[in-house]
Image (tube, grey):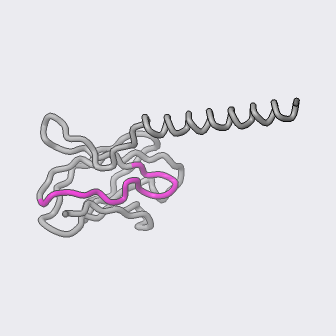
Amino acid sequence: MRLTSTLLTIVVGSVLALGACKKDEATSKPADPVGTVGPDGIRRVAIEAGRTGYKPDRIPAKPGEKLILVFTRTVDGECLSQVKVADGALTPLPMNTPVEIPVTAPASGDLRFACGMDMQTGVVAVN
């Protein structure tokens, strides 16, 4: 009897735990990788410069669209401590501090961004 009661407790607890996980997944809102448009009509895109590189590393855009790329470095180290957008200058990325870089998407193709060592990259890709 004691074994059956213990087994029943484990099964019920597992079902409740799985149900709670599914509920959290369904109600949690995923991060918006394409950004938000402000009252000025310019889209701001948050980009994490972290352990696995840039997230997101591909940002869809319309030809000629104005964007503000908001880089936040979340990892220590030299590689991601700077970013270069297209042929622009290297911009320092202090730890955990958002840095805004305004860009305009090209008429076609990609606008590339990369770390100071050119090892981590990303693009603004025109659809």
Q: Nearer the viewer, residue 40 or 100?
A: 40
Q: Quadrant of residue 17?
A: top right
Residue 66 image point, x, y percent? 15, 50
Is-magenta flag for residue 122? no
Q: Nearer the viewer, residue 66 or 95?
A: 66
SS majority, magenta: strand
The residue sitting at the right extreme is 2
Kindly identify the residue that appears in the image at 20 percent across and 57 percent down.
Answer: 61
Instruction: Answer left or right for 100 relative to 119.
Output: left
Kindly identify the residue that appears in the image at 23 percent across and 47 percent down.
Answer: 68
Kindly identify the residue that appears in the image at 28 percent across and 49 percent down.
Answer: 34
Residue 57 image point, x, y percent? 36, 59
Magenta range: 48-63
Instruction: Classify the position of the C terminus by image quarter.
Output: bottom left
| In the rendered image, the vertical position of residue 122 relative to residue 26, given as above or below | below
Q: Nearer the viewer, residue 126 or 93?
A: 126
Residue 79 image point, x, y percent? 48, 59
| In the rendered image, the vertical position of residue 7 relative to residue 56, given as above or below | above
